[in-house]
Amino acid sequence: MTIIEKYIELNAFIKLKGLATTSGRAKLSIRSGKVLVNGMVETRNRKKLVAGDKVSVEGKEFIVEEKVCLKVK
């Protein structure tokens, strides 16, 4: 087992959590300034999130878990 990545991109995380139905909608939400990462507005779609990062979208807060970040091959 080899771990390839230890992060997840912000747009993928938002889609994974069901906060956007498509990648396009996730990107629009991020670029509109509605997404906070660790308390700061984040407008980069491909911002790399690691375990422990806090993501807030429209008052809902999520903590990135390590199992979400790992891609195993």
Image (tube, helix red, strand yellow):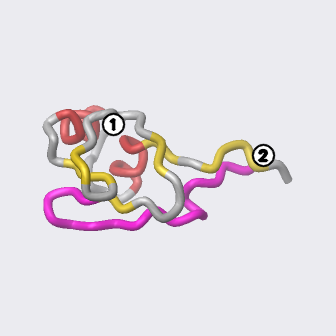
Q: Tell me if residue 10 comes above or below residue 45 in the rendering.
A: below
Secondary structure under tag 2 reads loop
68 in the magenta segment: yes
* Precedes in sequence: disc 1 or disc 2: 1
Q: Quadrant of residue 44?
A: top left
Disc 2 residue type (three-letter): Lys
Q: Give coordinates of residue 32: x percent, y percent.
A: 14, 36
Specify the label residue 1 is tagged with: none
Between 18 and 35, the one lying in front of the other is 35
Q: Tell me if residue 27 comes above or below residue 1 in the rendering.
A: above
Q: Name the residue under label 2.
A: 73
Q: Give coordinates of residue 34: x percent, y percent.
A: 15, 47
Q: Tell me if residue 60 comes above or below residue 39 in the rendering.
A: below
Q: How crowded is mark 1: few (under 14 residues within 10 Å), some or many (20 or more)?
A: some
Task: Name the residue: 51% across, 47% down.
Answer: 8
Q: In the rendered view, does 31 fall on the left or right side of 52?
A: left
First to last magenta residue range: 56-73
**Which residue is outermost to the right?**
1
Specify the label residue 23 is tagged with: 1
Q: In the rendered view, does 32 fall on the left or right side of 30?
A: left
Task: Name the residue: 53% across, 61% down.
Answer: 51
Task: Name the residue: 41% across, 34% down.
Answer: 46
Q: Distance between the residues labelled 1 and 2?
A: 24 Å
Q: In the rendered view, does 67 fall on the left or right side of 14?
A: right
Q: Give coordinates of residue 24: x percent, y percent.
A: 27, 32
